[in-house]
Image: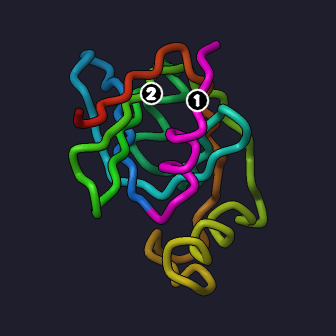
Amino acid sequence: MARLTEKIRTLFDGKNFATLSTLEPDDRPHSTVVWVKRDGDDLLFALPRSRRKTANLIRDPRAAVVIFDAARPYESVQVQGTASMDDDPHGMLIDELSHKYLGGPYPGFAGPNPQWVIARITADKVTANWPN
């Protein structure tokens, strides 16, 4: 398991969007922009059970996450790791993430009554890119 430095933790704790990449059944990458929360050195995502990225992670838990600070776009991090999935029947994480990113309750982008899961990415490799 790889560790996140304090600078990397700060990047994930900020209001920065991440890109989650999973593998399609034919091994092509599938990437989507997501909200993210850090729990120690793990990364958490609230995903609707019906989405492609969720099915991909259930089938093959390998994933990569890229994040950068919009104010300093040349500062970026890639985390490669393994996902585990847990049900979130009350959508607690999506509501927490909505408060982080939007400042209020989740407005329902995923459609009516989605079934939520929490994807937890445990880092195997962390690569940071900071300008000199």
Image location of residue 93, percent across then percent down = 69, 60
For residue 128, above or below residue 13: above
**Label 1 vs label 2: CA separation?**
9 Å
- Range of residues picked out in magenta: 1-15
Magenta span includes 3 = yes
Label 2 neighbour load within 10 Å: few <14, some 14-19, many 20+: many
Residue in view at x 43 percent, y 49 percent: 51
* Residue nearest the observer in this picture, 111 or 132: 132
Image location of residue 8, percent across then percent down = 51, 39
Image location of residue 107, percent across then percent down = 52, 84
For residue 5, above or below residue 100: above
Inspect the image, locate mark 1, and give the three-letter code of the amino acid beneath it. Leu
> How is colour applied across the structure in the image?
rainbow
Residue in view at x 59 percent, y 16 percent: 2
Magenta span includes 93 = no
Inspect the image, locate mark 2, and give the three-letter code of the amino acid beneath it. Val
Q: What's the mark number on residue 4?
A: 1
Q: Which image quadrant: the N terminus?
A: top right
Residue beneath disc 2: 79
Instruction: Please tell me whether mark 1 or mark 2 is closer to you in this view.
Output: 1
Label 1–label 2 contact, CB within 8 A? yes
User: With 10 as the anchor, is 30 left or right in this view?
Assistant: left
User: With 10 as the anchor, is 27 left or right in this view?
Assistant: left
